[in-house]
Image (tube, helix red, strand yellow):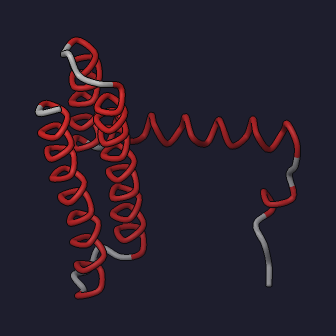
Amino acid sequence: MTESPFKGKTGVKRVLNALGYSLDGLSAGWVNEAAFRQVTLLALVGIPLSFVLSMPAWAHAIVVGSHLASMIVELLNSAIEAAVDHTSLAKHDLAKRAKDLGSAAQLVCLVNLAAMWALALTA
C-alpha cells in the first residue's frame, strides 16, 4: 500500500505543517462556506454573552462547548460536501445521502446548542 509522502514527517516540522493545514482549513471554511461563517458569528456572539449573563461555571462550559461543537460539525459537513463534489457533480443516491447526513449532523448539533442554552439559562 502506498502512503502519502506527508506521513513520514515527524517532530516540530510535522506540528508546524499540521498547524498550517488547519489554518488553511479555517480560512477556506470562512471564505467558501456561508454556514461556517454563520455558526462562527453565532459563537462570537453567544460565547461572550454567556459570560455577561449570570450563570454557573458548568453552564458556561456547556454553552462554549456546544458552540465549538457546532463549528466543528460545520467544518466536517463542508469537508464531506467538498469531497463528494470533487468525486462527481452527477446526481447519485449515495452522494445525496452523504450530504444529507452531514446536514443532519449539524441540525442535531444546533438543536443541542439551543437545549444547552435553555439549560444554562434556567440554572
Q: Quadrant of residue 3?
A: bottom right
Residue plotted at (34% across, 68% down):
85
Q: Nearer the viewer, residue 118 or 79?
A: 118
Residue plotted at (25% across, 86% down):
92
Q: Quadrant of the N terminus?
A: bottom right
Residue plotted at (35% across, 33% down):
58
Image position, residue 29 (x, y; %)? 38, 41
Q: Quadrant of residue 28?
A: top left
Q: Which residue appears farthest toward the bottom when viewing the image? A: 93
Image position, residue 46 (x, y; %)? 22, 26
Image position, residue 52 (x, y; %)? 22, 11
Q: Which residue appears farthest toward the top when viewing the image? A: 52
Residue plotted at (27% across, 30% down):
43
Image position, residue 53 (x, y; %)? 18, 16
Q: Is residue 66 above or below residue 94?
A: above
Q: Is residue 6 above or below residue 45?
A: below
Q: Is residue 38 above or below residue 88?
A: above
Left or right of 83, for residue 99: left
So how many labels did they put on this image?
A: 0
Q: Quadrant of the C terminus?
A: top left
Q: Nearer the viewer, residue 41 or 28?
A: 41
Q: Is residue 71 above or below residue 77?
A: above
Q: Nearer the viewer, residue 48 or 19?
A: 48
